[in-house]
Image (tube, rainbow, N blue to C red):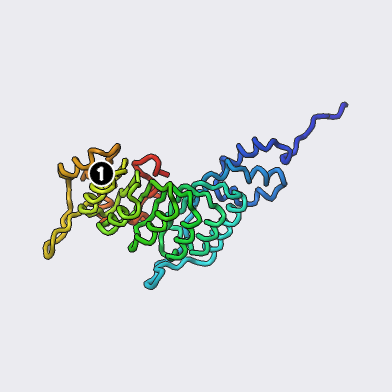
Amino acid sequence: MEENNSVTRRWEDLDIDILVKIFQSFNIFQLTSGIACVCSSWRMACCDPLLWKTLDLSVTRSNFIKIPLEPYVYVDAPSDKALTRMLKISLSLSRGNIRTLIFHFYLYVSDDQLTYTAERCPHLRRLVMPAWNRIKKTGICKAIRIWRELESLTMPSIANPPYLLEEIANNCRNFSELKVMGPFDSYFASTIITYLPKIRVLSLRCAMLVKDALISILDNLQNLEVLNISHCLLIEIPPPPAPRRIVRELDQSILDKASRLREFITCMKDSCIMCQRTRNDEGLMRWYKYEEGVWKVDEVSSLSL
């Protein structure tokens, strides 16, 4: 009987382009699981820029508990080590090619982790920030100085916005898109007007929005093209001692001011589930209560994840 002379091809001899196509279907856990250590051709495929346009860490979150003192959360050591390991492998394989970086809203990144990341993806253009608890002023400012090509930022609300927005204004000349996930008052509005007057896209969805802040934005951001206030808890703050009042419907003066925009996206319906959630959470969304990934949604297509 004749022997079977068929040639068996080894995995490591597979064409690099085919390997890259296969690896494109992998998530961050699979890409950092050790496949780059199989052989030199697999490592070459794992470093292909096509795999690293986006580093999506929204699939992982910290294992934490809330505590009464700053930073108000405690992240357990195994969770922190797992994130550090994932960052080191990802950033090594990406070779500086990451353009979009997405953190989970409840991924409590430390200053050291943020700085390490910034130094290894200096050409970042879009950033989706995690909660601020463990990130200090020095840490985020150092990162922004590295990310000079940054164009778009999604961030939780911040108590003292001037230092951050001034850093962006001084370093990121192409910055044009901002999403704030949290309360938005007149102080925040005036800070944007001062430091980011040429911003083109702004999303404030699912937040407590002060009516005067909205009016300031419409009056002063002359380059603004798209404004999303869907599902916001719009409040009016009259002079003391009168209590604040929830605004149920936009008045004609606001609609007239917004008519110059290319897109003015609103939703204030009592029947809308997201509007109900914002009201129930008093304008400070507790995203952990809802289905996973709902925090990623935005009516502005360029901001939706």
Q: Is residue 271 left or right of residue 194?
A: left
Side of 83 relative to 295 (left or right): right
The residue lying furthest to the top in this view is: 1
Q: Mark 1 Cα within 10 Å, few/some/many (few <14, many 20+)?
A: few
What is the quadrant of residue 162 in the picture? bottom left
Identify the residue shown where x is 35% and y is 41%.
300
Q: Residue at x 70, y 48 (%)?
A: 38
- Dot 1 amino acid type: Cys
| Residue 231 image point, x, y percent | 27, 47
Circle 1 — which element? loop
x, y percent for residue 138: 45, 65
Which residue bears the numbered disc 1?
272
Is 114 located above or below residue 34 in the figure? Answer: below
* Front one among 199 and 237: 199
Identify the residue shown where x is 57% and y is 54%.
120
Q: Is residue 58 visible?
A: no
Left or right, 182 with respect to 151, comes to: left
Q: Position of residue 8 (x, y in %)?
A: 77, 34
Q: Nearer the viewer, residue 199 or 229?
A: 199
Q: Which percent across, then down, holds residue 174?
A: 43, 46
In the picture shown, does residue 94 fall above or below 139? Answer: above
- How many marks overall? 1
Quadrant of the snapshot with the C terminus: top left
Residue 223 lies in quadrant: top left
Does residue 129 appear anywhere in the picture? yes
